[in-house]
Amino acid sequence: MTLLVALTILLAAEYGGASIYMWISLVILPTVSGIVSWVVGRRQRNNDTLNKLQTTVDMLLQKNSDLYVKITEQNRTISNLNDKNDELSSQLADVRRENAELKEGQEKMIAQLTALQRENAGLKKQLEQLNKKR
């Protein structure tokens, strides 16, 4: 740009005073077009940056939506598993109660069996004694 201004000054000095058109064509127009190009280019770069940011935001929103769906499905699965766990815990408690009752019944039966075995042994002795007496 400095070279262009220097050239314009040389031309103006050589021709004894440059016309306004020469100043416009050699200094003002290139300067204005440079500024306009820079502004337009800057605006384009800003638009490109905004487009890239929008693409990134859209991608993140999609990932967020996908993760939300997965989390919702996993929460449903966890809820179903918790319900199943509660049901199985209830069944386990019932089985433990039943098992305790069966053990108690088994102990009673063992006690009765032991008593019957003693009674049987006593009856055998009585039978042997009666057989010996005959």
Image (cartoon, rainbow, N blue to C red):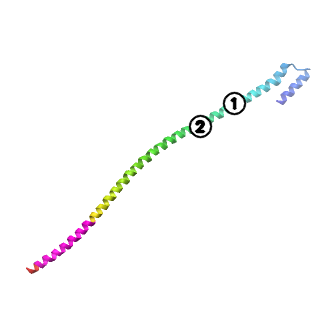
Residue 130, position as x, y percentages in the image: 11, 78
Identify the main secondary structure in magenta: helix
Q: Amino acid at mark 1?
A: Arg
Q: Secondary structure at mark 2?
A: helix
What span is in magenta?
107-130
Q: Quadrant of the N terminus?
A: top right
**Which residue position holds label 2?**
57
Q: Quadrant of the C terminus?
A: bottom left
Residue 124, position as x, y percentages in the image: 15, 75
Q: Residue at x 74, y 30 (%)?
A: 38
Q: Residue at x 87, y 28 (%)?
A: 6
Q: Residue at x 57, y 39 (%)?
A: 60
Q: Secondary structure at mark 1?
A: helix
Task: Name the foreground residue: 90 vs 47.
Answer: 90
111 w.r.t. 12: above or below: below
Q: Which mark is residue 43?
A: 1
Alpha carbons under labels 2 and 1: distance apart: 21 Å
Q: Badge 1, how many Cα within 10 Å: few under 14, some, many 20+? A: few
Q: Amino acid at mark 2?
A: Val
Task: Name the foreground residue: 130 vs 31.
Answer: 130
Task: Name the foreground residue: 33 vs 87.
Answer: 87
Is residue 26 left or right of 75 when viewed as pictured? right
Q: Which mark is residue 133?
A: none
Residue 132, position as x, y percentages in the image: 10, 80
The picture quadrant where one finds residue 97 is bottom left
Residue 36, position as x, y percentages in the image: 74, 27
129 w.r.t. 59: above or below: below
